[in-house]
């Protein structure tokens, strides 16, 4: 009787041990598959975002080299010169192709250490920002059909203006720009805090 009991106990222990090993192997395999799927998704998302950043960088470089029609840009630049002293301003090219350029006054920029309009390339940046508005608008239209796109994209200049795909920007242009210009991601790109930044 005891021998029979010991045999049954031995085989049941053996079967339980074997089942534990099989379940452990199945669990490990399942976890590896899940991690592999997550890694593949992250790689695809990283590649997608990298490609998009390259697209915008190349678009900005192209805008600097081959600008929009001279009349359009000249009109926008003249409007900037007229409005730059206003507390806040908006320049829209009266078409559905670009985003409006929003900005704050010279006085606001002058009283902030991180911002400056005393840059010989200000005109070039202003023109390129207008062209970037076309790229951002294009991507915001595309974003409506592709859920992988972020819900909000923007360009913020140290010269006191910005572009944004977000329609509702809170209380006003100055408050919104101030919130952007005091964000850690913006402040940490200063020449003092990040000497490698261009």
Image (cartoon, rainbow, N blue to C red):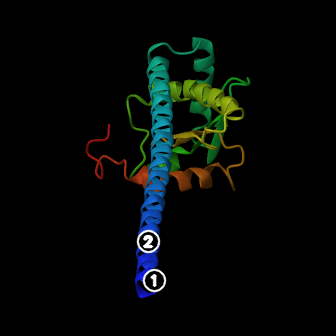
Residue 5 shows which numbered tag? 1
Q: Which quarter of the picture shows residue 102?
A: top right
- Image marks 1 and 2: residues in contact by CB distance under 8 Å: no
Q: Residue at x 31, y 41 (%)?
A: 197
Q: Position of residue 51 (x, y in %)?
A: 47, 29
SS label for mark 1: helix
Most extreme residue toward the bottom, as rendered? 2
Most extreme residue toward the left, as rendered? 195
Question: Is residue 82 toward the left or the right of residue 117 in the image?
Answer: right
Indicate which disc, 1 or 2, sits on the residue closer to the N terminus.
Answer: 1
Question: Is residue 52 toward the left or the right of residue 98 in the image?
Answer: left
For disc 1, the neighbor class at 10 Å (few under 14, some 14 to 19, many from 20) is few
Residue 11 shows which numbered tag? 2
Q: Which of label 1 and label 2 is nearer to you?
A: 1
Q: Residue at x 58, y 19 (%)?
A: 73
Q: Position of residue 20 (x, y in %)?
A: 45, 66
Residue 196 shows which numbered tag? none
Q: Residue at x 61, y 48 (%)?
A: 87
Q: Which quarter of the picture shows residue 70?
A: top right
Most extreme residue toward the front, as rendered? 1
Q: From what the image shows, is residue 54 above or below residue 195?
A: above
Question: Is residue 185 toward the left or the right of residue 146 in the image?
Answer: left
Residue 115: tell me if it is visible: yes
């Amino acid at each position: 009787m005891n021998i029979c009991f010991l045999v049954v106990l031995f085989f049941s222990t053996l079967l339980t041990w074997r089942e534990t090993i099989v379940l452990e192997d199945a669990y490990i395999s399942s976890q590896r598959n899940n991690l592999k799927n997550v890694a593949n998704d992250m790689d695809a998302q990283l590649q997608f975002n990298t490609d998009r950043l390259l697209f915008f960088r190349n678009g900005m470089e192209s805008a600097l080299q081959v600008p929009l029609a001279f009349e359009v840009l000249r009109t926008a630049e003249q409007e900037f010169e007229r409005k730059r002293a206003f507390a806040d301003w908006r320049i829209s090219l009266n078409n559905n192709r670009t985003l409006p350029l929003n900005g704050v006054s010279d006085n606001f920029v002058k009283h902030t250490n991180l911002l400056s309009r005393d840059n010989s390339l200000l005109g070039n940046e202003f023109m390129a920002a207008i062209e970037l508005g076309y790229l951002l608008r294009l991507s915001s239209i595309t974003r409506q059909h592709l859920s992988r796109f972020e819900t909000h994209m923007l360009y913020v200049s140290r010269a006191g203006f910005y572009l944004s795909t977000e329609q509702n920007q809170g209380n006003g242009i100055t408050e919104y720009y101030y919130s952007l210009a005091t964000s850690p991601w913006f402040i940490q790109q200063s020449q003092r805090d990040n000497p490698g930044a261009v």
